[in-house]
Every structure is written in C-alpha cells, then in structure tokens.
Amino acid sequence: MKKTMILAVTAMLMTPVAAMAERDGATVYNTKCLACHMTGAAGAPKVGMADQWAPRAAKGMDALLATAKSGVGAMPPMGTCMDCTDGEMTAAIQHMLDNSK
Ligand code: HEC
C-alpha cells in the first residue's frame, strides 16, 4: 500500500497533467489485464498464484514495467492498454502483485 502511494506520487510529479485523470490499478486491471491474468490465458501469470508471480516480482517494478510496455511472449505491448500512462501500468502491475502474495 505504502509503495503504491510512493509510486503514485512519483508518477504525479513526473506527469502532472495526465495524473489528473489517472485510473487506479484495480480499474486498469479489471478493464485491460484481467482477460489474460485472471485465467492464465496464453500462459499469463495468474493473479492469486504467488508461485507464478514471485520470480517475476523479483525482477523489480522497473523491469516489469519495461516488459509490460514492450510486450513479452504472448502478451501484446501495453497489455492492450494503449492509452495507459506509466503510472497506470505501474498501478495495475502493483495491483496484481498485491493480490498474488
Ligand atoms: C492478451 C493477454 C494479456 C493481456 C491482455 C495482458 N497480459 Fe500481461 N502477460 C501475458 C502473458 C502471456 C504473460 C507471460 C509472458 C511470458 O513470460 O512469456 C504476461 C506477463 C506479464 C507481466 C510479467 C512481465 C515479466 O517481466 O515477467 C506483467 C508485469 C504483465 N503481464 C502485466 C500486464 C498488465 C499491467 C496488463 C494490463 C494493462 C496485462 N499484463 C495484460 C498476457 C497478457
């Protein structure tokens, strides 16, 4: 929770305009990421499966954000959220990590 706040504040400082309309992690996840990450479709790490997320989480948020933006394997760039800001992507990833412990 604390970490999410820090990330959100950092994102606000970096993008003051976009931050005004930022969707939170749960909203982005529920609308854009859930289709694959809830079911494990196409080999996506499933939310709630700590063992599937632990090795990815170990890479750190910067690395996860970078791969999520570029796409990886069967995951399309930005996880299909083409209009997501870095802050929104980070919040969505954090939401998945928080729910996969
Ligand atoms: C079309 C299906 C699909 C959607 C939609 C999707 N993902 Fe993924 N995601 C995947 C798959 C498949 C992988 C595993 C790819 C691999 O490691 O080969 C993955 C992996 C990841 C990873 C781990 C990356 C790493 O470095 O190990 C993150 C973080 C992630 N997704 C975030 C997101 C976010 C955030 C969204 C929504 C904005 C999203 N994904 C939407 C399919 C999807």
Image (tube, rainbow, N blue to C red):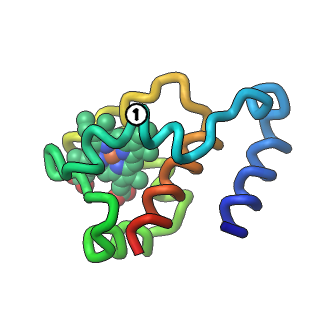
Q: Is residue 70 visible?
A: no
Residue 97: quarter of image: bottom left
**Distance from mark 1 CB to nearest ligand 1 atom below 8 Å:** yes
Q: From the top left corner, tell me how far across and down residue 60 is, in percent.
A: 51, 67
Identity, as a three-letter code, of the amino acid under mark 1: Lys
Secondary structure of the residue carrying tag 1 is helix
Q: Which residue is mark 1?
A: 32
| Whether residue 42 is situated above or below residue 62 in the rendered picture | above
User: Would you call the spot at circle 1 few (<14 residues within 10 Å), some (14-19), or many (20 or more)?
Assistant: some
Q: From the top left corner, tell me how far across and down residue 51 is, in percent.
A: 27, 76
Along the line of sight, which residue is nearer the eye, 75 or 95? 95
Q: Residue at x 45, y 43 (%)?
A: 29
Please state if 99 lies on the left or on the right of 41 as rendered.
right
Q: Residue at x 32, y 66 (%)?
A: 48
| Whether residue 7 is situated above or below residue 75 in the rendered picture | below
Along the line of sight, which residue is nearer the eye, 30 or 36? 30
Q: From the top left corner, tell me how far across and down residue 57 is, in percent.
A: 43, 69
Q: Quarter of the image containing the N terminus?
A: bottom right
